[in-house]
Image (tube, rainbow, N blue to C red):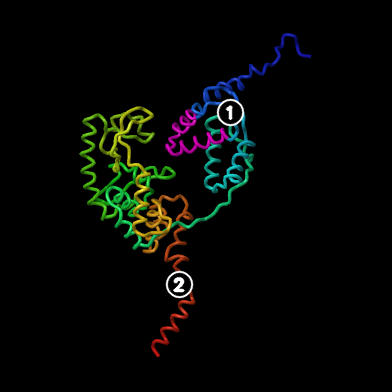
Amino acid sequence: MPEANTPRPNPRDDPTAEERRAQEKAITGVGTAHHIHLADLGRAIEHACAVRYFSKRTYEAYLGWARRFVMFHGRRHPADLGAGEVTAYLSHLVVAGNVAAATQCQALQALVFLYAQVLERPLPEGALRMVRAKKTRRLPTVLSQEQVAAFFDHIAGLPRLVALLQYGGGLRLLETLRLRTKDLDLERRMVVVRSGKGGKDRMVPLPAVAVAPLREHLRVRHQQYLIDRERGEAAVNMPQAMARKGLTLAQQWPWQYVFASQRISRDPQDGRPKRHHLDENHIQSTYRLAYRAAGILVPACTHTLRHCFATHLLERGQDLRSIQELLGHSDITTTMIYTHVSTRGPGGVTSPADDLFGKFAASRSQE
């Protein structure tokens, strides 16, 4: 029997539980209610991504998956859901949505992040036993050099300059559009790609054919910058690590976008007028028109030029390790996919039947 003076334990006085309730309320704004405002969850995810210097695209992807997960479970609070509900949703994506393995993997990463970093309630290891999407290996679309030349015959202006850097240096489209003036070295013909996919920096070649048009473009771009500065509209978005250094740095020429938009827009986060980079959708539609005009019938896109860069280098005898570094691949097995579409790889193997009958044809012609 406990002594009369011994107080009975009260679950409400449990500091761990109380801290958890306070934490959840701070995160979502509504405690552990069964329904939540998605805007509150969005702010929590945005903060968790910002302190980890995640890109805007990563934040938007994680937010999108969190919202779809919540809606799938009838807008229930994620804190009231667990590994079982996460498993059910991820399986639903495959069974009903027929999503690719990469899509399911992104959804998994987003929800693991939501529970571990936003709600601070990590999902138990090994608890997720969802239906897995089958991994498929798709060969990249690669054009011949003649087709690439035909493409360039039907594209002009800034989109052509963007395409030159993509094909000449193997850049992704957004890597090209996010280039700052300080990233170009016209004298050494080098481009520094900063914080590419995976947060890695790398150096790639700047094609000689792009130097003169780039120099002229930067001259015009600098005049535009001077006008913006006089109007107090010279600021640009800065990387997270540099944003803390104030507005002054964001107004300096080295940080200006090479491929800047023609219009000033207001930043939704701080309300300041800024000049963003060119819209990727505009470049994508311009590429599609150029491919069509060039008579290219295969499914080519903006990423096709990067595939062509790697494949054509391989066909010229460049080693795989160098191509891996130029592309910024973490794993060389990713780069090895180009051996399957190169004329020096399996696709370029000469059939023994061609050798055999070629010899017969040659000997008969000499008779």
Residue positioned most to the right = 1
Which region is colored magenta?
42-71
Discs 2/1, front: 1
Q: Along the polypeptide, which appears first: circle 2 or circle 1? A: 1
Residue 338's spot in the image, x, y percent? 44, 59
Q: Residue beneath label 2, please?
A: 350
For marks 2 and 1, give the CA distance: 61 Å
- The spot of residue 335 in percent (x, y) is 45, 55
User: What number is the disc on residue 77?
Assistant: 1
User: Picture quarter containing residue 197?
Assistant: top left
- The residue carrying pointer 1 sits among few (fewer than 14), some (14 to 19) or many (20 or more) residues within 10 Å by Cα, namely many
Name the residue rendered at 49%, 77% in the picture.
353
- Considering only vertical position in the picture, is 108 above or below 364? above
Task: Tell which of 242 and 72 is nearer to you.
Answer: 72
Give the side of residue 329 with respect to residue 243, left or right: right
- The amino acid sitting under disc 1 is His
Above or below, 51 against 217 in this view is above
Residue 240 in percent (x, y) is at 39, 34
Q: Quadrant of the N terminus?
A: top right
Image quarter where the C terminus lies is bottom left
In the image, what residue type sits under mark 2? Thr
Q: Is 73 on the left-hand or right-hand side of 297? A: right
SS label for mark 2: loop
